[in-house]
Amino acid sequence: GEDVEQSLFLSVREGDSSVINCTYTDSSSTYLYWYKQEPGAGLQLLTYIFSNMDMKQDQRLTVLLNKKDKHLSLRIADTQTGDSAIYFCAVLMDSNYQLIWGAGTKLIIKP
Amino acid sequence: GAVVSQHPSRVICKSGTSVKIECRSLDFQATTMFWYRQFPKQSLMLMATSNEGSKATYEQGVEKDKFLINHASLTLSTLTVTSAHPEDSSFYICSAMDSSNQPQHFGDGTRLSIL
């Protein structure tokens, strides 16, 4: 079945850019999402990209999609301590409209 | 690994009835549970956060009288859709966290269809 993979941890210095990567297997997915989970809180939709786009930018966030390699990335510019969270990649299955989730990447900010 | 069981997986009922969905953590104590709704072809939306023994915190735009959430024990939270109407038809997903807050485990979801 569909599989979505992410590395479990990413450590960056405050002020640097963070790049969180995600790979998936279902090439027919139309929507791909990034969710953020802060400590003790539920998931919040951060941004999403349609499969016919290569890039989407929203303030400090840039999403890149490489459909050929089935690779999705989230770049956070000028990373701040408030960006500390777990970031989940999720892919929408076109066959049944269910979301398939990655395990989440914990972003650790070093001062 | 930790498992969250959600029941029922699918329910079809008539307009006007109330539907209860259960979310259970099977091998850990879930101090916090979350309820999400997924609209067709759209992503997950957080509806509410519930902490064991206290009232749920609802997200803006979610009617608390419509979607009753009870988190009476450390292993069970329930979502009751009261007087359901066709527009309430959706996919509802719960998740649970223990006191360490890591990680969040998801149920398999409940597909609710109101005729």
Image: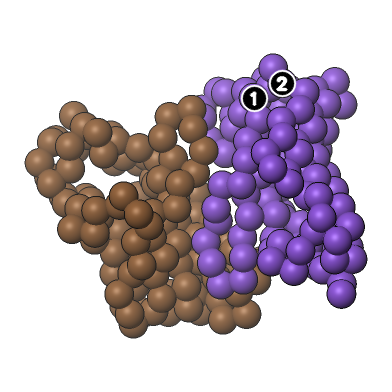
Chain colours: A purple, B brown
The residue identified by callout 2 is: A53
Tell me which amino acid carries mark 2: Met
Nearest the camera: B71 or A64?
A64
Nearest the camera: B24 or A43?
A43
Q: Residue furthest top?
A: A52
Q: Is residue A19 left or right of residue B112?
A: right
Residue A31 location, quadrant: top right
Mark 1 packing: few (<14 Cα in 10 Å), some, or many (20+)?
some
Residue at 85% over, 66% down: A14
Mark 2 packing: few (<14 Cα in 10 Å), some, or many (20+)?
few
Vertical position of residue B70 compared to residue A78: above or below: below
Residue A56 at x, y = what percent? 71, 30
Q: Is residue A103 left or right of residue B34?
A: right
Q: Is residue B87 left or right of residue B26?
A: left
Residue at 82% over, 68% down: A109
The answer for which chain carries disc 1 is: A
Nearest the camera: A75 or B35?
A75
Residue A94 at x, y = what percent? 57, 23
Vertical position of residue A47 compared to residue B72: above or below: above
Q: Mark on residue A100?
A: none
Q: Quadrant of the C terminus of chain A?
A: bottom right
Residue at 85% over, 48% down: A19
Pointer 2 with pointer 1, Cβ within 8 A: yes
Distance in Å between CA atoms under marks 2 and 1: 6 Å
The residue identified by callout 1 is: A50
Count the marks: how many? 2
